[in-house]
Image (spheres, rainbow, N blue to C red):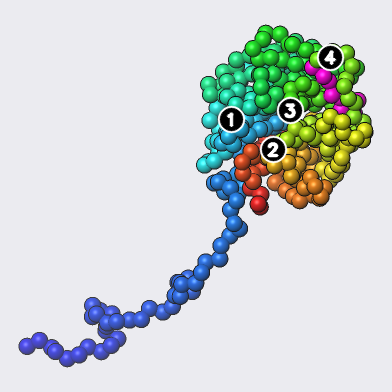
Amino acid sequence: MADTAKRPLEDAGNGAIVEVKRPRTDGEVVVAKPIKEGPKRTSALQAPIMLLTGHAAEVFTMKFNPEGDTIASGSHDKGIFLWRVYGDCENFMVLKGHKNAVLELHWTPDGERLVSCSPDRTIRAWDAQSGLQIKKMGEHTDIVNSCCPLRRGPPLLVSGSDDGTAKVWDLRQRRSVKTYTEQYQITAVAFAEAGDQIYTGGIENVVRAWDLRQDDEPALTLRGHSDTITGMRLSPDGTHLLTNSMDNTLRVWDMRPYAPANRCTKVLTGHLHNFEKLLLKCDWSPNGDRVTAGSADRMVYIWDVHTRQLTYKLPGHAGSVNEVVFHPKEPIVGSCSSDKNIYLGELAE
C-alpha cells in the first residue's frame, strides 16, 4: 500500500506544487508610474544631434537643399558629398571633378543643380540627380573664393577671386557675361534679391554693391569692418546683408534703396577668427529672426537679430567651425568643421 503520509514542507521543492510568493526585486516594476519624458523633440531628425563622418579632410562649406531633405558639403579632399538629412544621414553620392579644395557651394533655387568654387580657379555646376558635372567656368586666373547663385529668375551666379575680379555667369552661356575689377582679392560675394546688383567683400575690408547695368564704378561702398570680409549672405526678404569678418564682428547692412547713409544697423560679437585665416561663412534663419556664423574657437554661435543677444553657443567640434547653416523648414542647424565632421542639431522652438 502506498505511503499517504504528508511530506514535510521542506521537501516541497522535490516536485510538489507549492505556491511560493516571489520576493520583490529592485529592478521589477511593481506599480505603474508615469515615465519621465526627455526633452521635447522639435524636428524629424532621427536623434537630436546627428554626426556625419566621411570626408577625408577639412570641410569648408555645406548647404541644405531647398526641400531640406539633402545636404551638400564641400571639403579639402576635393569632393562634394551629398547626404540624407533624415534617417541614418547616409552619404549617398560623391561629386568629383575639382582639382583642389571646395571652398563654397550652393544649391540653385530649384534644387536640381549645385554650383561650387575652388582654388583650382574654376566654378563648376553639377546635376544633383545624376552627380554629373554640367558646366565648368574657368576664366579666373587665381583662387576662386566664393560663388553665389541668383535666388529667382534666370540661372545667373556671381563668383569672386583672388585675381581681384567678380564675374557674373549665365549657365546658359559659355563665357561670363560681366566682369567687375577691384584692386585687391575678393573673398566673398552675393547676389541682390532683384538680380540687378552683386555684392563683393575682400581684404579691403569694405562691402561694394555693383550695378549690373553699369561697368565702371560701384553703386555703393559700405565701410565699417576693420579686417577681411570672409562671408556674406542676403537676408530671406532680400533687404539686409549679413557679413562675417576677421575683425571678429558680424554686421547687418540695410541694402534697401534710399536707406540712411549709415547702412550698418547691427554689430554682433562673440565668435572668433584666428591665425588660420579661414573664410568663415554666415547665414540667416528662414524667418530672418536669427543669424549664425562660423567661428575658429570650435563653437557654433547663434544670435537673435532683433535683440543682438547670443542665444546659442554650441560645443562639439574639435576644429574651426567653417560654416553653419539653418534648415529651410525645421529648427535644425548644420555645421561643418576642420575636424572633418558635420553635425546636425535641433534647436528649441
Cα separation, mark 1 vs mark 4, equals 38 Å
The residue labelled by disc 2 is 325
User: For residue 69, what is the image quadrant?
Assistant: top right
Q: Nearer the viewer, residue 131 or 76?
A: 131
Task: Please give the name of the residue rendered at 87% of the width and 22% of the height, measured from the top-left corner.
Answer: 219
Q: Nearer the viewer, mark 1 or mark 2?
A: 2
- Residue 82: give its label: 1
Label 4: element kind: loop
Q: Nearer the viewer, mark 2 or mark 4?
A: 4
Label 3: element kind: loop
The residue labelled by disc 4 is 214
Amino acid beneath label 3: Glu
**Image: magenta residue range:** 204-212
| Residue 228 x %, y % | 87, 29
Q: Earlier in the sequence, mark 3 or mark 1?
A: 1
| Residue 215 x %, y % | 84, 13
